[in-house]
Image (cartoon, helix red, strand yellow):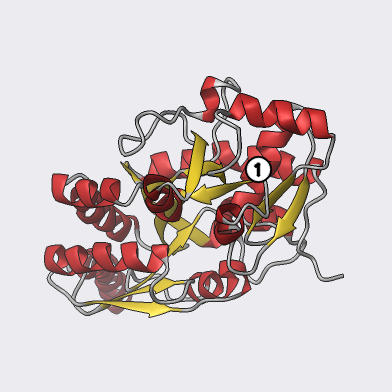
Amino acid sequence: MSISRRALAGAALVAPLAGIAGARAQAAWPTRPIRIIVPFAPGSSPDVIARLLGERLARAAGQPVVIDNRPGATTMIGAQAVAQARPDGYTLLYTINSTVSINPFLFSRMPYRVEDLAPVIRVLSVPFVLIVPASAPLRSARDLIALARARAGALNVGSSGIGTSAHIVMARFLNEAGVTATHVTFRQGPLNDIMAGRIDAAFEPSTTAIPQVEAGAVRALAVSGPRRLPVLPSVPAVAETIAGFAGESWQGLFAPRGTAPEVIASLSRLTRGIVETEEFRGRLQELGLVPEGGTPEEFQAFIAEESPVWARVIRDNGITLDGG
C-alpha cells in the first residue's frame, strides 16, 4: 500500500516537472538554425524580402536563418513542406496571399490545408499598378472603363497567368466597373507587351511597374491599394473611382499548425520588431511595397476577411486551375 502511494506521489511529481521542463525547452527557442521555405525562385520578390527579413531575424534571434527555395505548383510545393514539417519553430514559410486566400478556391484538391499553416505576421502588401501603353490616350481608370464599355469585350487585358493575383484583381476591377474584356496570359508577364502597345491594360506589381512608370515607358492610371502610394503620389487609388475597391497581394510568415504558442509569440515579437524599424520600412517603401506588421491574431482575422472576397471573384468568373 505504501509502495503504491509512493508511486502515485512520484507520478504526481513527474507530471509538473515534465511540464516545467517542456516550458523551459520552449522558452529556450531558438537554439539552432531556423529554415524559411520560400515557394519561389531565388531573385523573385518574395525571395528578396525573405532574405532581408531573414538577415535581421538571424541577428535578433542569435541563430542562423537559412532560406530554402521550393518553387512550383502555385506555391503548393513549399506550403506542403511546411504543413508537414515538425511544429517546433525551426521550419517556417514565407509566402504570398495565393497560398491561403486564392489557391483553396482555384483547386478542388490541394496537398495541404489552410489550417495547417499558423499565421505569424503579415510583413507587407504589394499594390498593383493599373498600367496602359504610354502612347494610349487614356489618363484615368474612368477613361479605361469608358473605353471597355465602348469596345464591349474587345479590350485586351493581360497577366502572367490564369489564377494569378494580377488576373484576379483585374477580374474584380472589371466586375465592379460593370465591363468586360479579353484576358490574355503571358509567360513572362504582360509588361513588355504593354510597353510595345500590343495590349491595352494590365495590373502590374508595384515593384516592376514603378520603374517603367518613372521612365515613361508605360502610363499609370491607378493603384490597387486603398490609398495612394508615396512613390506615386499623383496616381490615384482605384477606390477613388470605384468606392471600396481594394486588390493587393501580400507577403507573410507562417509556422506549421501545432507550433507552441510560446514559440509563435517569440517569432511574432522578433519579426514585428523588425518590420516596425524605420530602416526596414524605408527599404520596402523604396521598392513600392507597403509595410504591414501586426499580431498573429490580426493576420488570421485579415485572412478570414479577405478570402471570401477572392472566392466570390473566382467563382463569378469561373476561374479554375483544376486539371480535369
Q: Is residue 86 left or right of residue 15?
A: right
What's the residue at 47%, 62% (across, down)? Answer: 257
Classify 293 as above or below 63.
above
The image shows residue 161 at horizontal and vertical percentages of: 67, 61
The image shows residue 142 at horizontal and vertical percentages of: 62, 24
The image shows residue 84 at horizontal and vertical percentages of: 52, 75
Classify 188 as above or below 307.
below
The amino acid sitting under disc 1 is Met
In this view, the residue in front, 70 or 100, is 70
In this view, the residue in front, 84 or 167, is 167
In this view, the residue in front, 262 or 195, is 195
Q: Is residue 11 left or right of residue 70?
A: left
What's the residue at 18%, 69% (across, down)? Answer: 58
Q: Is residue 70 visible?
A: yes
What's the residue at 65%, 58% (across, down)? Answer: 103
The image shows residue 282 at horizontal and vertical percentages of: 20, 46
Indicate the quadrant where residue 64 lies.
bottom left
